[in-house]
Image: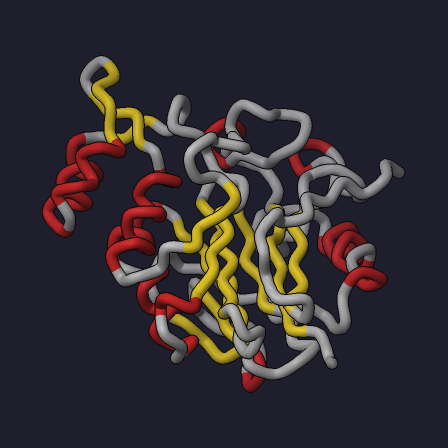
Amino acid sequence: MLQLDFIQPNWPAPANVKSLQTTRVGGISVGPYSSLNLGAHVGDNQVFVEHNRQLLAPYLPSSPVWINQVHGIGVINAASSSGLQDADASYSKLANVVCATMTADCLPVLLCDTKGTVVSAVHAGWRGLCDGVIEAAVHEMAVPASEVLAWLGPAIGPQSFEVGDDVRTQFITIDPRASLAFKPHSDKWLCDIYLLAKQRLQSIGVSQIYGATINIEFCTYSEVDRFYSFRRDNVTGRMASLIWLESI
């Protein structure tokens, strides 16, 4: 078994806000799911998935509140959630409730406020991002946007994310500034999902943005040994971005 390879978000979150980003390294899954696959919906052996999830237990105050991600803008209160709900973001104002999002190219966004009273985990694929999932999550946090901090986690990088005219048009129709996130590439476009997320955050007054901002830190597509990538492999596992409030 490999040693777990976590990414610790580098952002000035309050001391009681804890967060963790997994990679594909450290679990027992095999084949295309090798090795720390946390997704129970991707065709992996469920025994392996459950074992991999249990490997997280020493690092978390409780089991993550997993959601059934549908590329929409639904947001649930993780503290009162029961069962596997359809949503693409969750939030909590209670201690020891772990919000989680799973990705393999889509952008994970972790949110908290400067006072450490609320946290949120957002699954921002291009569809949800375009339709406003980040804005929906910030709204549910119910704190001033100026007090919100955001961390952008590992997603497909701007040199690898090829999209068609339809995707570009949808974003530009909502915000003309989105044109800056698309570069011509043959008859398609290369898309910077990090920049699109940053623009959306800024548009609602969130200016404290960390992780992949000016310099792209991660690319799930090109970093084969560290990250899962649906676009690269089609059949693959999922990584988790986790955030919670610690008891004081």
Where 130 falls versus 229 (above or below)?
below
Q: Nearer the viewer, residue 206 or 225?
A: 206
Image quadrant in which you'd find residue 176: top left
**Residue 44 picture location, percent across and down:** 67, 46
Horizontally, residue 24 falls left or right of residue 93, namely: right
**Direction right: furthest residue:** 1
**Residue 20 picture location, percent across and down:** 67, 54
**Which residue sits at x=62%, y=52%?**
240
**Which residue sits at x=43%, y=39%?**
213
Q: Quadrant of the N terminus?
A: top right
**Residue 25 picture location, percent across and down:** 75, 37
Q: Nearer the viewer, residue 231 or 197?
A: 197
**Direction top: furthest residue:** 186
Horizontally, residue 114 falls left or right of residue 37, namely: left
Q: Quadrant of the C terminus?
A: bottom right
Horizontally, residue 48 falls left or right of residue 89, namely: right
